[in-house]
Amino acid sequence: MTTQTPATLPMAGTPGGPELDDPAEAARYALLQRLAPALQHHLMGKFQSVGMIASMMERRFQLGQPDLGSLREDCQSLSSVSRNTVEAIVNLMTWIEPNQGATVALDSGVRECVGLLATKLRFKGFTLANEVDELAVPVRTQALRSVLSATLLALTDMLKVPATLVLRAVHTAGAVHLSVQVLPAEGGRKNSYANDYRALRQRDVETLALAESVQLTLDASGARLVVPCAAAQECQGLQAG
């Protein structure tokens, strides 16, 4: 079996590399370096279904008299899965090159962040318990992605023992309040990996939060984020409803 080394982003000073004189850009760069292995893992996973259907079709063609009805069904499945795969990959690429005006429902955005990081953090001894449900409050995609993912990584970097991180949220007029509660596990050891980029520090998350107009409180017991609604009138309407 061939072991693949996770791709890294361009280093400073190389063509296409970021300028790191700006603290916010330096924090974004550090965050993307930490997210890169998870993004790569999810990208590769999107191709698995396509490969499985293609292999099935190849085996059918090798038969002396292939079942044309089954091949037509395979072609339809391949077409559908391919479209879904392309859409998923395009969405994953927006983590690297975000659309500044894009918005997302809070529950969907939190679910996406948790889904991206859950497997990586589980290997280190951390469980993400997402209790944010049916809260379709519109927020800026980049603000939620960058600050929440940085918060989860920074918390797990600073903690010395495994823990469960519980995510909850409520909304008020014009903003949503997202909390991450740390519940340390009894016994066990935190795992670490040498191929990780540097630890995300509290000041990195604070810098990202400031750049995205997100109020942040962060320490080893957890975090609280106040994320502005993307459309205040719509947020107020949801609250009234």
Image (spheres, grey):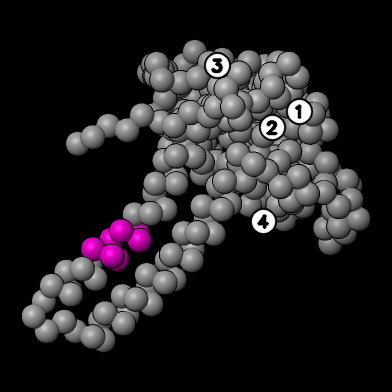
- Earlier sequence position, callout 2 versus callout 4: 4
> Foreground: 106 or 168?
106
Left or right: 78, with 135 as reference point: left
Check disc 4: other Cα within 10 Å, few if <14, some if 14-19, many if 20+.
few
Q: Which residues are magenta?
A: 49-55
Q: Are marks 2 and 4 in contact (CB under 8 Å)?
A: no
Q: Are marks 1 and 2 in contact (CB under 8 Å)?
A: yes
Q: CA distance from mark 3 to mark 1?
A: 17 Å
Q: Residue at x 82, y 58 (%)?
A: 238
- Earlier sequence position, callout 3 versus callout 2: 2
- Helix, strand or loop status at disc 1: helix
Q: Residue at x 58, y 51 (%)?
A: 91
Q: CA distance from mark 3 to mark 2?
A: 15 Å
- Earlier sequence position, callout 3 versus callout 1: 3
Which mark is nearer the camera, 3 or 4?
3
**As displayed, is residue 90 above or below residue 157?**
below
Q: Outermost residue, left direction?
A: 64
Q: Residue at x 62, y 46 (%)?
A: 94
Q: Which mark is residue 134?
A: 4
Q: CA distance from mark 4 to mark 1?
A: 24 Å
Choose top left, top right, bottom left or bottom right for residue 122.
Answer: top left
Q: Which residue is mark 2?
A: 147
Q: Which quadrant holds the N terminus?
A: top left
**Dot 3 amino acid type:** Ala
**As displayed, is residue 221 above or below residue 238?**
above
Which mark is nearer the camera, 2 or 4?
2
